[in-house]
Image: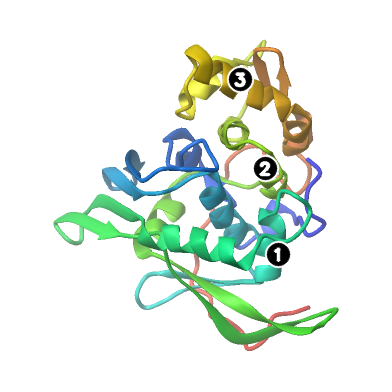
Amino acid sequence: MTGSSKTIPWRDRLLPTSTVSHARLQFFQPTYFPKLCERAIKSPYGDGVVKGKLGMTHALLLELINFYAIRKHVGDDKALHVLVDLHDIRSGMSRDGDRYSREGLTQIAADLKMTAIIIPHPSLGGDAIDGILDRLVPTRVTRSGPFGDRVLWRAQLSPTYRAILENDVPLHYDPTPIGRLRNGVSAAVARWVLTQRDTPQGGWHLNTVLKAVGAPVDGAMGRKRRFEVRADSDGLVVAGIEVWGDRVFKSVLSTPAGVLPTPAAFSLRPRAFPGRPRR
């Protein structure tokens, strides 16, 4: 996979890009224009529900926060605090080569903040109701750039979301090629394929993958979704997926040093923020 110049070996990363459940359990709607709805999920503590307006752009923001994490820290409130550079985030979210707008990023972050995760939590003796992204705030830490120092930001991920992230099967890949895809259904297909260890002989049938991500396969809507995936075939190759007619394959391009082809364990060890990150 050819991705960002900042792609680093997965062993050196602080966090996994995503987890298997995000793609396989239809955590996010397979579109860039999601609607407010409820979706069933499976958490480490049992089956739950996600209520919110979550699409492929929301998934991308969370992946970029994890992928570009500079420092991480589990606070006393059990939330996961991640230090990030918004320049990297906005560049990774753009599909036209320019940086994603500040207003658009604010709206996506607001949608994530308003999302509710309802799962059974053993310590509470019942259902825990939590969000995903609790806060996205500037810090006093800066990083040097061509136009002077810029402020780094802190993303605070909720304790419930951190528990899901920590106990699920981790995935390590560069999310920026997925962010360049023109159609949301193509991004959903890419994320689902990257959860698979091996490609079956002859690949997956395109309709099978569309059903797996929650996209329609019948009638005019199904034909449109298949057309959109095929139209993104060049971009999917960069993301590590090949589409040949009605067949989908995981490409060998998805396994360079910066990408983990098979899941491996990781732990969110508490680690305090330093005063200033290394350049």
Q: Quadrant of residue 75?
A: bottom left
What crowding class fits label 3: few (fewer than 14 Cα within 10 Å), some (14-19), or many (20 or more)?
many
Where is residue 89 shown, x and y percent of the image? 65, 62
Mark 3 belongs to which amino acid? Arg
Residue named by callout 2? 178
Q: From the image, tell me which residue sits under label 1.
A: 88
Q: What element carries label 3?
A: helix
The disc, 1 or 2, on the residue closer to the chain's N-terminal end is 1
52, 18: nearer the viewer:
52
Give me the residue at 77% from left, 58% from top: 98
* Precedes in sequence: disc 3 or disc 1: 1
Residue 28 in the figure: left or right of residue 40: right
Residue at image location 57% in from the left, 60% down from the top: 104
Whether tag 3 and tag 1 are in contact, CB under 8 A, the answer is: no
Q: Earlier in the sequence, mark 2 or mark 3?
A: 2
Q: In this view, does 108 lie above or below 236?
A: below
Give the left or right position of residue 90, taking residue 264 as reference. right
Amino acid type assigned to the residue bearing label 1 in the image = Asp
For the point 67% across and 62% down, the residue is: 90
Instruction: Choose between 9 and 82: the one closer to the eye.
Output: 82
Q: What element carries label 1?
A: helix
Residue placed under numbered mark 3 in the picture: 226
* Marks 3/1: CA–CA distance: 31 Å
Amino acid at the residue labelled 2: Ile
Residue 265 in sight in this render: no
Indicate left or right for 21 with 17 as reference: left
CA gap between label 1 and label 2 equals 15 Å
Q: Name the residue located 47 percent from the left edge and 34 percent from the top edge.
A: 24
Image coords of residue 171 (percent x, y): 58, 45
Secondary structure, mark 2, is helix
